[in-house]
Image (cartoon, rainbow, N blue to C red):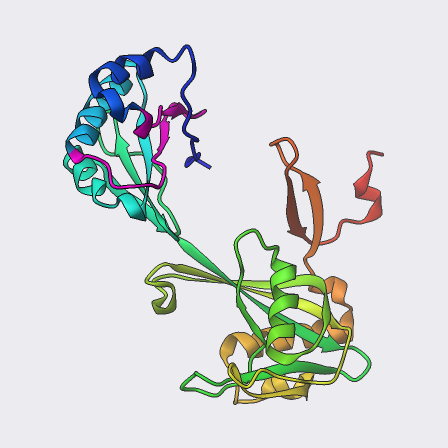
């Protein structure tokens, strides 16, 4: 939320752009005016196009940094498209460092205040989601063996969540892609947290398992991802040695819910409006008794 993307604009009354326009002549339309964000930082976005003159860019950048400091800004976020990557060296010489890169754009930052930077980091976690699809009529659960694993253990189908994708939607999508089974989200069962994950480039990993209800039953698994796929008796999965500790644990949790009631294990989801206008969020928690939903 700190990295707000600024669009290039030249306001009729933008005094700073006129001042720099005099010194840069024909270069003025190449450099954006920084947009102040609500945290007191400045966001700048260079537009894709032909390579810019590095000397002119350095002159503009030095003057802009001086002005931003005089204005009391705390930091600069600068987005540089890959077609202008030659300008990164100039920015680095003025103290900018990499924050992150996505697709065809690098985002650099410069802390303008004294002391170490207080800007937030980027991409500290990846989110993996699995779907435990339980057929309550038969007591069987859908499991797969990954093709590309050294240990062919039984597990729940799943994968990484896409940006902007809800947890339940990820579970349903991954189950369909891997097994051909259609399903419906019911609840969240568990969250595993793991740090220094090799498969996450050394970042932390969140692995979330959801309970799903099957809407179809004929398996058509993806042979590129799965070595085997079947409906397995839930109790067999809970106590077999041919699975991982996390799968075994969740199978036992499912078995408990299956026998004693899913209200004992489910974290259900509710949607609420966020503090930002027009946005909503999902909240996962144990169900509240109806008597607590309204004031008595």
Query: Does residue 201 sit above or below 36 in this rendering?
Result: below
**Can residue 210 be seen from the camera position used here?**
no
Query: Does residue 258 sit above or below 67 in this rendering?
Result: below
Relative depth, front residue between 160 and 269: 160
Q: Residue at point 25% right, 19% down?
A: 69
Q: Residue 258 in the image: x percent, y percent?
A: 75, 74
Q: Residue at point 21% right, 31% down?
A: 57
Q: Is residue 181 left or right of residue 68?
A: right
Decide whether residue 49 is among the magenta residues: yes
Q: Residue at point 78% right, 68% down?
A: 261
Q: Is residue 236 left or right of residue 2?
A: right
* Residue interval drawn in magenta: 29-54
Q: Residue 229 in the image: x percent, y percent?
A: 61, 87
Q: How many marks?
A: 0
Instruction: Residue 209: name its quadrant.
Output: bottom right
**Can residue 242 be seen from the camera position used here?**
yes
Query: Does residue 42 sit above or below 207 in this rendering?
Result: above
Prevailing SS of the magenta stretch: loop
Relative depth, front residue between 146 and 177: 177
Quadrant of image for the C terminus:
top right
Instruction: Residue 254: name its quadrant.
Output: bottom right
Relative depth, front residue between 173 and 51: 51
Q: Residue 275 in the image: x percent, y percent?
A: 61, 32
Q: Residue 230 in the image: x percent, y percent?
A: 65, 88
Decide whether residue 267 is among the magenta residues: no
């Amino acid at each position: 939320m700190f990295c707000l993307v600024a669009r290039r604009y030249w306001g009729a009354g933008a005094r700073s752009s006129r001042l720099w326009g005099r010194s840069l002549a024909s270069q003025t339309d190449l450099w954006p005016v920084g947009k102040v964000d609500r945290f007191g930082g400045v966001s700048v976005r260079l537009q894709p196009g032909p390579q810019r003159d590095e000397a002119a860019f350095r002159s503009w950048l030095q003057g802009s940094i001086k002005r931003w400091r005089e204005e009391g800004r705390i930091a600069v976020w600068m987005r540089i498209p890959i077609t202008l990557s030659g300008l990164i060296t100039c920015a680095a010489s003025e103290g900018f460092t990499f924050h992150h890169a996505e697709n065809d754009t690098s985002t650099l930052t410069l802390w303008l205040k004294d002391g170490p930077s207080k800007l937030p980091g980027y991409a500290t976690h990846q989110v993996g989601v699995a779907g435990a699809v339980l057929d309550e009529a038969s007591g069987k659960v859908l499991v797969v063996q990954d093709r590309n694993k050294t240990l062919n253990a039984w597990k729940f189908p799943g994968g990484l969540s896409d940006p902007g994708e809800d947890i339940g939607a990820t579970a349903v999508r991954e189950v369909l892609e891997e097994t051909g089974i259609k399903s419906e989200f019911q609840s969240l069962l568990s969250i595993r947290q793991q740090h220094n994950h090799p498969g996450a480039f050394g970042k932390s990993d969140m692995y979330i398992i959801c309970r799903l209800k099957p809407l179809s039953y004929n398996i058509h698994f993806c042979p590129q991802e799965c070595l085997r796929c079947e409906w397995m008796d839930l109790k067999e999965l809970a106590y077999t040695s041919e699975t991982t500790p996390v799968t075994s644990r969740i199978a036992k949790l499912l078995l408990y819910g299956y026998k004693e009631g899913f209200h004992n294990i489910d974290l259900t989801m509710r949607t609420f409006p966020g503090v930002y206008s027009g946005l909503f969020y999902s909240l996962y928690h144990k169900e509240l008794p109806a008597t607590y939903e309204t004031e008595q």
